[in-house]
Image (cartoon, rainbow, N blue to C red):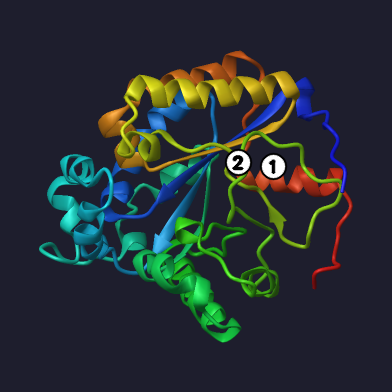
Amino acid sequence: MGHAPLDWPGGCNSCFCLRVDVDTVRDAKACSQLLPLLRENGVRATFFVATGPDDSGRNVFRALKRRGGKRYAARYGLDGLRGLLLPALDVEEQLGAWREILDQGHEIALHGYWHRIWARDATGWTEGETRKAVEEGLRRFERSFSFKPRGFAAPSFKTNANLGKVLWEAGFAYSSNTRAGGPIDPPESLGPVVEIPVTCMNAEELMLEGATEEEASERAISSLEASIAGRKLFCYYVHPYFELGHRERAFRKLLLLAGRRGAWTPTMGESADWLRRSRPEDTSDL
């Protein structure tokens, strides 16, 4: 199916979607510190909040065996042991800044239920198991925030053949479950649930693989510049604790570039709504 560049709203030359993944208690607590940085640069974001226990510490031994394991330990320290040596608190209950996030024009969406278990098992789930996890995530989300989310992002990009149907039946307007190799032109038609893929590896991933902060930053900036030159959609995702603790200067540079170069910086929900109005719906997969 062919693709064609879009004329973005307000005469903007591209679309910059910022996806903030709140995977852990530490991420939830860092969100309030991220807000001033977004406000200074006129960038709005969608905060995808994981629900259920943060027991990410149970991944620590596997992480240490992987390439970059020592860097993982150095970066995440004791909080990387949550669920092992520290209590496994529910992530959604630790997002004290949620009203502030909404008041400043950002969006809060769902990042699944029980991040560690989803990332480990979801690719093999049946339709019933997938639905149960999505429904539990919704129940906890609505209990904490008093509204139903419009967007969904699968933890660790782990999906299965049933997830799209489950999300559509649950009433989600859009998802961000996949990756693309670079900035994209949206397809000529969209599915019932608009998919907005992440289009660039983030600095955290690159640095855990051995890249320097400067190298990781330049890769993200080059990808954003390519989206501007080609009038494309660029979607970048971050974990707030990491961005603030390890690369705030580089992250600030990326946000500044998006604003100064004329990119549209909507929430992902706003982007999905605009894409829906601009493209016909394709229901062939339902």
The residue furthest top is 260
Residue name at image x 74 percent, y 48 percent: 273
Answer few, some or many: residues within 10 Å of disc 2's Cα (few below 14, many 20 plus, some between 14 and 19).
many
Height in image: 236 above or below 129?
above
CA–CA distance in space, label 2 to label 1: 6 Å
Q: Which mark is residue 91?
A: none
Task: State the residue position of label 2.
Answer: 267
User: Left or right: where does residue 207 sit relative to residue 260?
Assistant: left
User: Left or right: where does residue 147 sit relative to residue 206?
Assistant: right
Answer few, some or many: residues within 10 Å of disc 1's Cα (few below 14, many 20 plus, some between 14 and 19).
many
User: Left or right: where does residue 138 sit relative to residue 186?
Assistant: left
Height in image: 184 above or below 39?
below
- Residue closer to the observer: 241 or 149: 241
Pinpoint residue 239: horizontal percent, then vertical percent: 38, 43
Residue name at image x 83 percent, y 28 percent: 7
Task: State the residue position of label 1.
Answer: 271
User: Is residue 41 visible in this depiction of the protein?
Assistant: no
Regarding mark 2 in the picture, which secondary structure is present there?
loop
Height in image: 256 above or below 32?
above
Height in image: 233 above or below 63?
above
* Pointer 2 with pointer 1, Cβ within 8 A: yes
Pinpoint residue 184: horizontal percent, then vertical percent: 70, 37
Pinpoint residue 164: horizontal percent, then vertical percent: 67, 68
Task: Quadrant for the C terminus, please.
Answer: bottom right
Please, what is the three-letter code of the amino acid marked with disc 2? Thr
User: Is residue 206 visible in this depiction of the protein?
Assistant: yes
Residue name at image x 76 percent, y 37 percent: 185
Pinpoint residue 196: horizontal percent, then vertical percent: 65, 48
Regarding mark 1 in the picture, which secondary structure is present there?
helix
